[in-house]
Image (cartoon, helix red, strand yellow):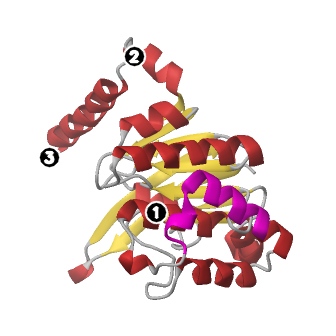
Amino acid sequence: MSIEVNNLTKIYRLKRGQKKLAVDNISFTIPDGEIVGFIGPNGAGKSTTIKMMTGILVPDNGSVSIDGLNFKKNRKEIMLKTGVVFGQKSVLCWDIPVIDSLKLFRDMYRVPKDVFKENMDAFSQILGLDEFINHPPRLLSLGQRMKADLAASLIYNPDILFLDEPTIGIDVLSKERIRQFIKNINEDRHTTIILTTHDVSDIESLCEKMIIIDKGSLIYDGTLPQLKSIYKTTDLEEIIKKIYLAGEQRNAKIC
């Protein structure tokens, strides 16, 4: 499924009548079946944009279209087609076993028993769910909880998956297993994946396209090879540092 973002804007109302422009009139397209890296420095507006793209926040201007559908008219249909994982917040019930949360999601989304079993078998094999599926999330490591959240977000076979920093704070081995899982889901199910991350290795190993924003404005929208060609280097970390530094210098001149 493709995503169309047109002139998206979000303004936060602060105390004493002050306002903060979090997302400034950005537009981009995410093609069907691609893994797209959505990056920017802290405070760039990434999470705000993702929340508008998933219907959590309502934009002050502009629109988000999911395969021709919009949240105003087609919210329920869109929610059935999208999965979301926020690295800092879990969708799992904190005090009950992971398997019970997954069964709850199965019932909420009316997943057929054979599809649920097929997914559980696949998730157990790739993510190693069997090691902790009968434990509550409060007893899990961060890596285990993230794997469980991934399973919960995909148990109903969504066409689009939003991943907000899914590997943050996770050990190297768990990161690699999660990356491989994301690759497999994209290849086997043709799932469109939007990934926000500060980990350059996530981008290098997963993303075909990159969208970069800073201070709420769109800085780059194109492929990873094109970006490296523009900066005449294959060192993505160095490229990103230059982009962020240029943004700081622009803001310093404005001030």
Q: Which of the two discs, 2 and 1, labels the residue nearer the N terminus?
A: 1
Residue found at the far front of this picture: 131
Q: Which of the two discs, 3 and 1, labels the residue nearer the N terminus?
A: 1
Q: Amino acid at mark 2?
A: Thr
Front residue of this view, candidates 104 and 7: 104
* Front label number (3 vs 2): 2
Q: Is residue 178 above or below residue 221?
A: below
Front residue of this view, candidates 32 and 27: 32
What percent of the width, then of the height, locates residue 113? Answer: 83, 75
What percent of the width, then of the height, locates residue 172? Answer: 36, 44
Residue located beneath label 1 in the image:
146
What percent of the width, then of the height, locates residue 105? Answer: 66, 79
The image quarter containing residue 238 is top left
In this rendering, does residue 219 appear at all? no
Instruction: Say left or right for 82 vs 26.
Output: right
Q: For marks 3 and 2, give the CA distance.
A: 33 Å
For the residues labelled 3 and 2, say whether their Cβ atoms are less than 8 Å apart: no
Q: For marks 3 and 1, give the CA distance.
A: 40 Å
What percent of the width, then of the height, locates residue 185? Answer: 67, 48
From the image, give the main secondary structure of the stretch colored magenta: helix
Magenta residues, start to end: 117-133
* Front label number (2 vs 1): 1
Instruction: Say left or right for 17 vs 139.
Output: left
**Residue at 27% across, 36% down:** 244
Residue located beneath label 2 in the image:
234
Q: For marks 2 and 1, give the CA distance.
A: 30 Å
Residue located beneath label 3 in the image:
255
